[in-house]
Image (cartoon, helix red, strand yellow):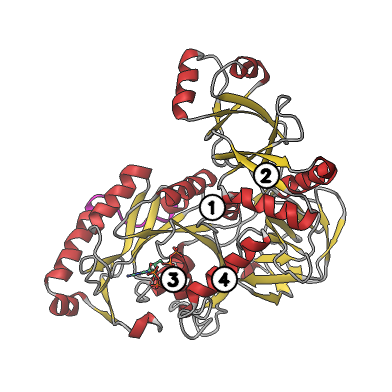
Amino acid sequence: MGREVKRRRTFAIISHPDAGKSTMTEALALHARMISEAGAIHGKAGRKSTVSDWMEMEKARGISVSSTALQFNYTSEHDGPDDAPHVINLVDTPGHADFSEDTYRVLTAVDAAVMLIDAAKGLEPQTLKLFQVCRHRGIPVITVINKWDRPGQTPLELIDEITERIGLTPTPLYFPVGIAGDFRGLLDRRTGEYVHFTRTAGGAKVAPEEIMDADAAAAREGDEWTTALEESELLTEMGQDHDQELFLAGQTSPMIFASAMLNFGVRQLLETLVELAPAPEGRADVDGTVREVTEPFSAVVFKVQAGMDASHRDRLAYMRIVSGEFERGMVVTHAQTGKPFATKYAQAVFGRDRSTVDLAYPGDVVGLVNAMALAPGDTLFIDPKVQYPPIPSFAPEHFSALRVNTADKYKQFRKAMDQLDSEGVVQVLRNDLRGDASPVLAAVGPMQFEVVTARMKSEFGVATTIEPLGYSLARRTDADSAVELGRQRGVEVFTRTDGALLALFSDKWRLQYVEKEHPDLTLEPLVATAD
Ligand code: G4P
């Protein structure tokens, strides 16, 4: 058991759309020999169509785009012949048009994050949002500068940008030899060796590597090598060498320069994950008592997805195993209801493919089919009982009123609303003025509204209309302040299903104005991860 846990690494890639997350996912799987040629996951030639078909299909049926986990084995160069391979779980963060609470929730299921940055673009908004969640949850971050085969910023510019904008100190492990657009290889700053890469046709195969000592590197790359050495020394002088404690504390970030497309730097990322990223650890329950990984089975549901399979209207709940061994078929207890839950249909899911999971360990992600009673944040366990803290709700930025089109469907409408609310598809806000017939939906990404209307129609037979509201920002308030806030222009107060009072503001200028005029009102930011 301890051995199974030790060899596991569970992580997510956080990035802005187009930084190369899909390409890197394929490259990682290629290196782990899970597939023989890059593209097997999405099918490189037909990748676009495969992915978009899937999304169209999901969209047409009103399901949120899948967030799943890819598992593969990896044997490190440092492993002995008798060592079992490492088990890598890559949990996908949905994050394109469908940026939603699920994107954040995934980060409650991982032990580390890889922040993937486009060398030409530097830090981008979605990466920043996701990074803040990692920081708040204390998830250590490895930084990968991708697309080094294309013109971009200099290494030191990128390092400065990260240091200054987010207060994270990059400590490059592998420094590029050759400027962005002329990617020759990597200086391994810890061994002083040079890793020279050779391109393969279309980047479809693992790029051959040649390891050289400093003299051979200097002879081969000349000035490019000298520049890399000088800049690396500069970083050492500034104290920017890897420090495991500071990395785990979220203060520094091991950094790798890479090209996912050419498969350069990908093996280095896998080695870094295996060597430096933490293995699964125990988790504190609602009372603060830690359930150790070696104790009996427990898991947290971090995402619930409806209707992936059109033939049977199923509902898939993804759980991250926290402790103990999971065996398919075992009957576990659902902590929230105290009811038994049979796990006959446990699956690993990636893309469209599902395969049955028979055994799983802490760090692994398992999909449970037919999970009608499960909601994000729920705990499953085998005695002794444990219940983990709920997944925090995240700060919504989009608000819409939802209306049922015909009054005779009102009952179904309420039922559907309760269902979608409990699944955590959107946050549901109500106030006396609008009444129950027109709740306000709050979401992190606007696509969630489409998901709601489509599911209302397909699963509950209720036609609804979405009306976007002119609010863009929410603050938590209290009953005393709510009275005064209710009198303000451009402000409306709501009660969320969990009882929290939220004041919605049209924009940040309105909020600033109200804060200035009424400094004693309670207006707390909804931290992206208010635990
Ligand atoms: P995403 O999942 O983060 O959105 O990004 P994705 O992997 O789809 O990559 C976005 C685009 O960037 C793709 O180009 C991809 O080929 C390219 N790309 C990813 N990694 C690298 C890299 O290391 N170097 C270079 N030069 N390009 C990279 P596209 O034109 O949109 O699609 P495609 O026709 O190339 O597949």
Q: Amino acid at mark 2?
A: Thr
What is the span of residues highlighted in magenta in the rendered image?
237-245
Residue positioned 74% across, 54% down in the render: 457
Query: Viewed as shown, does residue 268 lie left or right of 395?
Result: left
Residue 357 higher or lower than 437, as above or below: below
Residue 4 higher or lower than 404, as above or below: below
Does dot 4 land on a helix, a strand or a loop? helix
Spot occupied by residue 295 in the image (x, y as percentages of width and height): 73, 59
First-in-chain label (2 vs 1): 1
User: Which of 436/307 is in front?
Assistant: 436
Instruction: Please identify the dominant SS of the magenta region.
Output: loop
Q: Amino acid at mark 4?
A: Asp
First-in-chain label (2 vs 4): 4
The residues bearing labels 3 and 2 have C-alpha atoms spaced at a distance of 38 Å
The residues bearing labels 4 and 3 have C-alpha atoms spaced at a distance of 18 Å
The residue that label 2 is drawn on is 465
Say the numbered circle drawn on residue 99.
1
**Mark 3 lies within 8 Å of ligand 1 (Cβ measured):** yes
The residue that label 3 is drawn on is 23
